[in-house]
């Protein structure tokens, strides 16, 4: 077998591996919903109204009269309890980062009421370290690592946009004249009409 044949065979195996990898991600569910319960703060003395039952189920307890509490169970792809670390929370998300570099669209977002831990999960706390950093930084690290591993075979250009939607206004966070770069927000489709600053990283 000559070198050209060997290289062609190798490329086929790599391509097959890529397809199978992304098929597994699809089969695990193209929409996954995780629940993270943040720890109660030191000053809170009342028992928690949230109970993590198992890896995929949690209960919300509503106190009733005469000690008759009602419990409602909710099922997720996975439930992370108050002691879950940042790295544990990232484990299920990590494989999707490789899918991004294989040409798949991936969206990861945090949703929850104020103070529930969205920033903590996605960015990390102020006391920032390798252990405490959140999903965004971990994802970027992985993107750059895979980019390095594939260097010479595939060249990737990584760009970022950052925007904030607040009080029905879209604000371009990477614009030098940020204060003036505000657009009215009319819904999802309006984001495509707005030309936000694109920064190559
Ligand atoms: N898993 C966690 N472990 C320890 N502390 C946490 C955890 N999740 C959140 N916190 C702390 O709880 C507080 C509120 O969290 P955070 O700011 O992330 O909430 P948020 O959902 O982003 O709120 P907002 O919508 O108001 O911006 C912060 O002090 C944060 O450090």
Image (tube, rainbow, N blue to C red):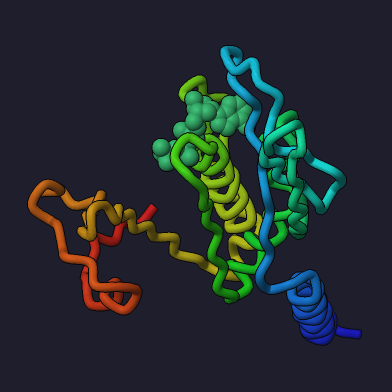
Give the quadrant of residue 97. Answer: bottom right
Residue at image coords 54%, 37%: 117
How far across and down, in percent of the image, does residue 135 sit? 58, 45
Residue 96 in the figure: left or right of residue 14: left
Residue lying furthest right: 1
Q: Of 92 and 78, which appears nearest the observer?
A: 78
Q: Is residue 155 above or below residue 166?
A: below
- Quarter of the image with the N terminus is bottom right
Residue at image coords 77%, 58%: 75
Residue 127 in the figure: left or right of residue 132: left
Q: Is residue 192 above or below residue 97?
A: below
How far across and down, in percent of the image, does residue 14 sit? 78, 75
Residue at image coords 78%, 84%: 8
Q: Of 51 and 39, which appears nearest the observer?
A: 51
How far across and down, in percent of the image, does residue 60 sit? 70, 44
Give the quadrant of residue 160. Answer: bottom left
Residue at image coords 59%, 65%: 152
How far across and down, in percent of the image, does residue 21 sit? 79, 71
Res. 131 visible in picture: no
Residue lying furthest top: 43
Q: Is residue 184 above or below residue 129?
A: below
Q: Of 47 and 37, which appears nearest the observer?
A: 47
């Amino acid at each position: 077998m000559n070198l050209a044949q060997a290289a062609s065979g190798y490329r086929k195996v790599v391509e097959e591996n890529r397809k199978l990898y992304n098929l597994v991600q699809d089969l695990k569910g193209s929409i996954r919903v995780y629940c993270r319960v943040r720890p109660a703060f030191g000053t809170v003395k009342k028992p928690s109204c949230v109970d993590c039952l198992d890896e995929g189920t949690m209960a919300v307890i509503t106190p009733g009269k005469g000690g008759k509490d009602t419990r409602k169970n909710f099922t997720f792809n996975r439930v992370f309890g108050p002691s879950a670390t940042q790295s544990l929370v990232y484990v299920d998300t990590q494989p999707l980062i490789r899918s991004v570099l294989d040409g798949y669209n991936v969206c990861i977002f945090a949703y929850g009421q104020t103070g529930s831990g969205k920033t903590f999960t996605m960015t990390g706390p102020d006391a920032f370290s390798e252990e405490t950093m959140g999903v965004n930084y971990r994802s970027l690290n992985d993107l750059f690592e895979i980019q390095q591993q594939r260097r010479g075979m595939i060249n990737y250009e990584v760009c970022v946009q950052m925007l904030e939607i607040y009080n029905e206004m879209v604000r371009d966070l990477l614009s030098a004249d940020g204060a003036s770069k505000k657009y009215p927000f009319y819904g999802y489709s309006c984001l495509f009409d707005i030309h936000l600053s694109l920064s190559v990283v």
